[in-house]
Amino acid sequence: LDVRQAFDELGIDEVKCNDLGIRLFKVACVWPIGRQELADFAQGLDLIIVVEEKRSLIEVQVREELYGSANQPTCVGKKDETGNWLFPVKGALDPNDIAIAIGERVLRYHPSEELSARVAHIRDAQRVLAETADAGTVTVKGEDWTTAARGTAARRRRARVAQMVFQDPYQSLDRRQT
């Protein structure tokens, strides 16, 4: 969904993707990746951008499966072509960051004033967001949840109302954990 939202923000729909030679490959089962499906997808591509949260489980497989193949495409994901961070390992991915990464690379192959302006606009919006102080609060049923100290009765009461669940893709694939 984040990648599709990024394309929407760039003004790239399915028809324009086809015109630009952009393909999307949604991986249904992250381990192991389908070798033939990946090879078919990568056929004739110069660049593959792997967008995934947390660790680079898919990116590593894509690199290994395509290494040494005829016309091996460049593969970027957690790091870009020069080894700088592209998508973070920690935290959530932001559709705006994805749009900037995709837009910059599309512009290398297909220069466009419209796309360049959209990328610049998104980059400016991200800069403004980064400079904005976070002064938000979490309110549930009219009660401010941002002020409870650890170990207080209010915090214990809140824990019975709401819990957070974090999923680690490696552990979710571990048969011993299921």
Image (spheres, helix red, strand yellow):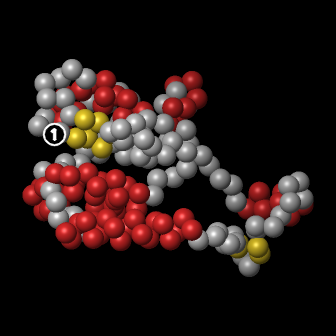
- Whether residue 46 sits left or right of residue 105 in the image: it is left
Q: Please tell me whether residue 141 is drawn above or below residue 54 in the rendered image.
A: below
- Whether residue 107 sits left or right of residue 165 in the image: it is left
Q: Please tell me whether residue 27 is drawn above or below residue 22 in the rendered image.
A: above
Image spot of residue 43 (x, y percent): 13, 35
Q: Secondary structure at mark 1?
A: loop
Query: Measuring 76% from the left and 73% from the top, which residue is drawn there?
Result: 144
**Residue 148 seen anywhere in this rendered image of the structure:** yes
> Residue farthest to the top?
68
Query: Measuring 16% from the left and 60% from the top, which residue is drawn there?
Result: 111
Query: Measuring 66% from the left and 72% from the top, which residue is drawn there?
Result: 136
Q: Nearer the viewer, residue 72 or 174?
A: 72
Image spot of residue 41 (x, y percent): 18, 38
Residue with the mark numbered 1: 45
Q: Please tell me whether residue 25 is drawn above or below residue 73 in the rendered image.
A: below
- Neighbor class of circle 1 (other Cα within 10 Å; few <14, some 14-19, many 20+) is some
* Quadrant of the rendering where the C terminus is positioned: top right
The amino acid beneath tag 1 is Leu
> Residue farthest to the right?
152
